[in-house]
Image (spheres, rainbow, N blue to C red):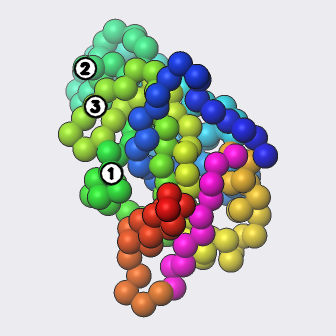
Amino acid sequence: MLDFTVPDSVTPIVAWRYWRLGVGDGRLRSLTGRHQPWAPGQALQARCRFDDVDRSDWRYRLVSGFSTEPHPAPAEGCTCGLYAARTLEDLRGQMLFGLSRMVVGQVSLWGKVVPGQHGYRAEFAYPHRLCVFDGSVRRDAGVLDALSAYGVPVEVVGDRQGAFSPVRAVARAFRGLTG
Ligand SMILES: [Zn+2]
């Protein structure tokens, strides 16, 4: 198992986010940014989402959050950075799609971190604790192996209970880990 830790000089912010499980490799992927992969044992560094476009193309000026100057991510006047919600409740306010292949968890954020109303945009991020739904594990037993490569606690929660609330199930699982 990898023993990934954030740099010694840094006290990371721990926040919440969703990932999706990559098909085939079982790696964590962002929901946005062309499903950017998160490599085990390696901090993910933010890049401005406009780095790959021609910034001189005037049409980008119509895009919300666009800035004409290249910059390190996250920048105050841009929308770039690795996103995470402040609390599980804040995360719940975001889109929740089908539970299949979804991972919910805590993420460590460090480097430059821009706070927002419900969360953060960060320069560096690495998973802190992961929670996967048992339906995903039933469908693909390799999921737990793939997730264990990140070297952080992984919880499996049931998605077949009556009146199932994923948020409550995740909160319960994480209370168990803390307590
Ligand atoms: Zn940017």
The answer to whether 72 is drawn above or below residue 80 in the figure is: above
Estimate the x, y position of residue 12 in percent, counting from the top left.
46, 31
Q: CA distance from mark 3 to mark 2?
A: 12 Å
Instruction: Please give the name of the residue rendered at 46% of the width and 64% of the height, measured from the top-left corner.
Output: 175
Q: Nearer the viewer, mark 1 or mark 2?
A: 1
- Mark toward the start of the polypeptide (3 vs 1): 1
Estimate the x, y position of residue 3 in percent, counting from the top left.
72, 38
Instruction: Please give the name of the residue rendered at 38% of the width and 71% of the height, measured from the top-left corner.
Output: 168
Which residue, as the protein is rendered here, is positioned at the far front? Answer: 179
Q: Are marks 1 and 2 in contact (CB under 8 Å)?
A: no
Estimate the x, y position of residue 125 in percent, counting from the top left.
51, 33
Disc 2 residue crowd, few under 14, some 14–19, many 20+, Cα 10 Å: few
Instruction: Kindly tell me whether residue 96 is visible in this rendering.
Output: yes
Disc 1: which residue: 87
Mark number displayed over residue 115: 3
Q: CA distance from mark 3 to mark 1?
A: 13 Å
Residue type beneath disc 3:
Pro
Residue type beneath disc 1:
Thr
- Mark toward the start of the polypeptide (3 vs 2): 2
Question: 134 left or right of 121?
Answer: right
- Mark toward the start of the polypeptide (1 vs 2): 2
Question: Is residue 131 on the magenta stretch?
Answer: no
The range drawn in magenta is 151-160
Q: Are marks 3 and 2 in contact (CB under 8 Å)?
A: no
Q: Give the SS element for disc 1.
A: loop
Residue type beneath disc 2:
Gly
Instruction: Please give the name of the residue rendered at 58% of the width and 29% of the height, measured from the top-left corner.
Output: 6
The answer to whether 80 is drawn above or below residue 16 in the figure is: above
Judging depth in this view, the residue of 38 and 61 nearest the camera is: 38
Mark number displayed over residue 77: 2
Instruction: Please give the name of the residue rendered at 46% of the width and 21% of the height, measured from the top-left corner.
Output: 111
Q: Give the SS element for disc 3.
A: strand
